[in-house]
Amino acid sequence: MNATGKVHDLIEITERLASLLMKENRALGEKNGSEATKYLEEKSNLSRIYESRIKGMMENPTALSAVDPALRKKLRELGEKINLMIVENANLLKLAINTNKQLVDLIADAVKSQRPGPGIYEAKGTANKS
């Protein structure tokens, strides 16, 4: 595949990844974890492909000089957009993880405080839990 074809391919992959990140970021922002997890596998696959294609282009940057400047500009703008979306995604994921951890800690603390202690038997043989 020539350089122009590679750029077209990368633009398509980048647009798909951007669309996916937009959906996942929206779901994370709405605190809809079940919706956000739907995108994990595809995001992982697209990210791996994206990274591989970028790495391949960086190995021969002079080949890009043969690509139409408008196409290079589009790719550069998409790259900037996707980088911002990745940062936003990472921040939203950290927030979701911290929120879930706090919730688990609160539940664990509540369970610990509700655990009955050893009962004291009263004269009638019944246990007093206080």
Image (cartoon, rainbow, N blue to C red):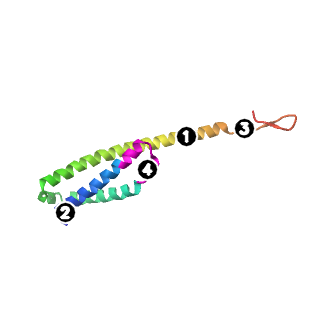
Query: Which amino acid, mark 2?
Result: Gly
Give the Cα separation between the discs numbered 2 and 3. Answer: 71 Å
Q: Main secondary structure of the magenta part?
A: helix
Q: Which residue position holds label 2?
A: 5
As rendered, which of 59 and 35 lies closer to the eye?
Answer: 35
Report, in whole angstroms, how far the alpha carbon at label 2 lies from the one at label 4: 34 Å
Judge depth for marks 4 and 1 and give the one in front: 4
- Above or below 101: residue 40: below
Q: Earlier in the sequence, mark 3 or mark 1?
A: 1
C-alpha distance separating marks 4 and 1: 24 Å
* Helix, strand or loop status at disc 3: loop
In the image, taking residue 76 as reference, residue 101 lies left or right, namely: right
> Between disc 2 and disc 4, whose residue precedes?
2
Instruction: Report how far apart the C-alphas of labels 3 and 4 lie in the structure.
Output: 41 Å
Report whether 107 appears left or right of 22.
right
**Is tag 3's residue or tag 4's residue first in the polypeptide sequence?**
4
- Are the residues tagged 1 and 2 within 8 Å (C-beta)? no
Q: Secondary structure at mark 2?
A: helix
Label 1, secondary structure: give it.
helix
Q: Is residue 22 above or below residue 58?
A: above
Q: Which mark is residue 120?
A: none
Within the image, what quadrant is residue 50 found in? bottom left
Label 4 Cα crowd, 10 Å radius (few <14 / some 14-19 / many 20+): some
Q: Indicate which disc residue 117 carries.
A: 3
Question: What residue span does the magenta drawing correspond to?
Answer: 23-38
Image quadrant where one finds the C terminus: top right
The residue to which callout 1 is attached is 105
Q: Mark on residue 35?
A: 4
